[in-house]
Amino acid sequence: MRGVVDPSRKRKIRLGVALCVAVLLGVALIYVSFNASDETKEPSQILTAAPGQKFEMNAKVVPKSVRHDGETLKFEVEDRSGGGAMPVSYQGVVPDPFRGGREIVLTGAVENGTFVGEPESLITKCPSKFTTNASETAGTGSGSSSSNG
Amino acid sequence: MASVGGVLLALAFFVAAASAITAVVWRQDDARVVLARRGVYTVFGLLLACIVIVEIAMATNEFHLNIVAEHSSIETPMFYKLAAMWSSQEGSLLLWAFVLSLAASLALYSTRHKLREIVPWATGVMMAIGAFFIGLMLFAPGVNPFHTIPTPQDGIGLNPLLQHPSMMIHPPMLYSGYVAWTVPFAFAIGALITRRVDSEWIRATRRFALIAWTFLGFGLLLGARWSYSELGWGGYWAWDPVENAALMPWLLGTAFLHSIMVQEKRSMLKVWNATLIVATFSMCLLGTFLVRSGVLQSIHAFGDDTVGPYLLAVIGIVVIGSTCLIVSRLDDLRSDQKRMDSLLSRESVFLINNLLLVGMVVVIAWGTFFPLISELFTGTKSSLAAPWFDHYTTPLAILLVLFTGIGPLLAWRRVTWASAKKVFRIPVAVALLTLVILLVFTDAGNKFWPLALFTFASFAIAGVLQEFYNGAHARQKTSGGSFAGALIAVTARNRRRYGGYIAHIGVAVLLIGVAASSSFQTNENVSMKPGETRNVDGREFTYKRPYVKVDDEKYTIGAIVEVKEDGKYLTTLETSRRFFRPTGAAATGGLADYFSGEATSEVGLKTGLARDIWVTVAPNVQDVQHQLAVAEKGLKTCIEAGPGTPEQCKQLSALMRAAAAEPRLQPQALQQIENLQLLSAERIARGYVSEAGAATFKVIINPLVLWMWIGGIIGLIGALIAVWPTRSRRKGAMVRTEADALKEAKYREIRDAELDHASGKLSDEDYAILDAELRKEAVEILDAVGVGAGTGETLRAGRAGLPSDYEGGNGNGNGGSATATVENGDGAPAQNGNGSNGHANGHGHTNGAGNGNGGSSEPAGRD
């Protein structure tokens, strides 16, 4: 009879459509995520990058390097495993856990050899759990590390 | 004490492993299965003892235990000493194993008379996982909670950031949420292995799934609140990998809780449910792994990777093993698969909601693991920021709210357009009214997504409130009494349904808070000197005065800020930044050390139903630091007592030298130095207050954010109502048989259909068809389990005048009355069009729809 679709065929068509939609959505997700992402680099990798290119930097704040220059916070960072030190300037309120020796994530670009962070983009790793290294708390904090202000 | 703890932990490992092996290898032997169950109880007892030992050690400063030395100190307040256990890697693993043993014990106790084939396998799975976590503590390096070290004088102490009341409850809630998912997972595996893939394992573990969901959700909410009120950045969610790791199993668990209803009611989605519970549990393990592995950058600190590889191996085993098992049981899972009768039905909406929830998890998982994915495919590690997550989860969340509203309005199986129009009328009108009000009176029209969310949320809330009204109205019509009484009664007797509805309201309210606070937030940094005023979002903020408080632990620099709105005084806020000296034995005790430890912000917060005003201060402390360093130098010179120093310094120097030779003088000498330090610090503090310069203030105006917390609490109340045992279950349902549970579930379906009919969701025609189908299925169950023919005949007879839960006869609507049903012969939704006590099954007489174990036995059909 015309107009009547076999139920099993109908199910297969539905499944096919659903799979096509899922694949399309998946491809779209991949496309937008690669376009929207920022490269994550450590200071030693950023040092050689072209000026103006935007990165998300994972780094460790060099102890005793934090100081203020007017409204701007200046400090040095290095790779998490050490080395590759570079200067950073940042404007904005810093998170509570920020200080020398802490790992940070900062978005920005290199200008004249300094990594200039975007305002409000500084994230400091919260030492909330499993801090087994006592020296992180006691030893690496610097007398000059300070809050913004 | 450490050695006792170590022995108990080792014993727990062996008992857990032995229970797992015994339960599986001798699964046909009843006595051995019972022995294995008792082994689980023993593991619980042993781990409880281990936790008590650790807590006593924390409370009594047993610093020879590494866990105590690294996470507590003499000065740590007792409250935080007790919470310090789970701030450590080893303590959190102990908590994991303990909660698992507790959940496993409860699950096995509640199923000791049923699921005979599945229980041994479930025991095996739960105890294998338990043995794994206990084994980690025993055999992985550096995570034994009873590891001892040379006793230091003092411990490092608990990080000041963790010294917040939430620390006591947030981590245990999250762990309990993660761990409780093990129970439904283990029973699902048991069901798959034994090919008992009907709904029995779901009915037996549904409560555990709900408890896990509640704990996990409440843990997330507490974490968000903690972050908002304490961490000084003004947000409650950052799409951080660790946060995402907890959110993903919660979302999958939400999907699971809905889709198992479809399996229970319609025998559908069995493959989906098995897959969902495996995915949920795997996500729980993944969350545990992420916190401990360091594979992804997170604002949360990660430990070393000593346990990461082991956890990864277990995740691999769980995922691969479960997938193979599901694939090998596809025929069983599809054996009595039913098809959806109509797209306009509750099950189809549940399916859509499931797809949306899983879609959200896919997006979040993709974003969370994108750094690894991008590195794998491009060789470059890239990451996705919070706006990316917002961008792609927001539309899904909004659709979810819409379908959360549609679901409760539809009946199971099929709904006619006429019925649908009837039940949708008021919620749609409320949604349209909300839309118009928002467009006319607010700025919400400028932002599409929040506007859509507010509209759909109002639709969802109105729909649920209508459900409550209809249910109570129907009850009041048949049983009389007040409307409020009817509302309470209908909720109490249908806890699962109405508890779920309340949770829906909670989620809708929570999302309103999220949408408003994230889309219409004002966030500004302003610099002010004392006496200056700045305008933020139409409000005047005046820096009235600074203040400083000093003690031997911390240096607190604060500010008093006055807020005015339209020229009128609104509130005065106090905010401060506390600079802690490094804690514990590593502290040098110098003046400059005030600024070398942790810093925390105390938020000035004015909470209101319309908006929160949130302020933190970032004072300029460079001068203070400099002066403290100079004072420190001066103090050193004083102690050295060189030529020309004052007499006081010479006396102190003499005391120090004497203390070096005579230990009993040391406290006196240290006290003198501490007093001098404090005097210097206070002098510098007074200087700061009198000559304070500009400080930077972070000011956030957060509209409707309070509703986020209110919504969370409403959701929690709903979940507790849904999970709360019914009277009959509390009294004796533990001894119910599988047959009881099966009948009970079918009776509940009949009552649900009747409630749907009474509340207008089902037309007379649809109800007649549905009721006949359900009764036929109920009779088949009764015949299969060998209940006397009387009940079956009663059910076959027709549907006229069927008494229902809301009419007050069946004990409860949540499935607690079946034992009494069988024993008293009065539990079935019975035929009593004349309202009389018709004979049921030869054992007794039908009295309404049953009275459960001691439940009420109102005459049915009294109207």
Image (cartoon, rainbow, N blue to C red):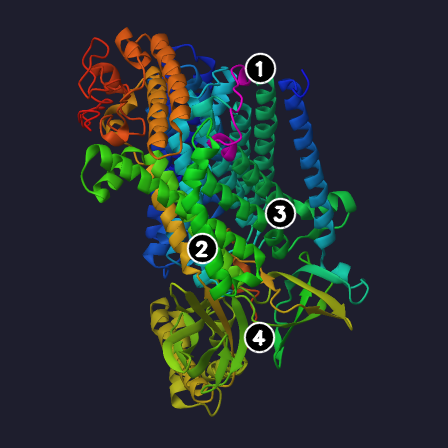
Q: Residues in magenta? A: B331-350
Callouts 2 and 4 close, C-beta under 8 Å? no
In the foreground, B155 or B809: B809
Badge 4 is on which residue? A144
In the foreground, B572 or A42: B572
Task: Tell me the mark number nearer the camera, choosing from 3 and 1.
Answer: 1
In the foreground, B318 or B348: B348
Badge 2 is on which residue? B433
Badge 1 is on which residue? B331
In the foreground, B171 or B752: B752
Would residue B341 be counted in the magenta stretch? yes
* Disc on the earlier residue, 2 or 1: 1
**Image quarter of the N terminus of chain B:** top left
Where is residue B45 shown, x and y percent of the image?
A: 33, 32
Where is residue B784 shown, x and y percent of the image?
A: 37, 8
Asked if marks 3 and 2 fall on the same chain, the answer is yes
* Disc on the earlier residue, 3 or 1: 1
Where is residue B239 shown, x and y percent of the image?
A: 57, 52
Spatial separation of the CA atoms under disc 4 and disc 3 = 35 Å
Amino acid type at circle 4 is Ser
Label 4 crowd bin: few (<14), some (14–19), many (20+), radius 10 Å: many
Callouts 4 and 1 close, C-beta under 8 Å? no
Badge 3 is on which residue? B368
Spatial separation of the CA atoms under disc 3 and disc 2 = 39 Å
Which residue extends farthest bottom? B644
Residue B668 in view in this figure? yes
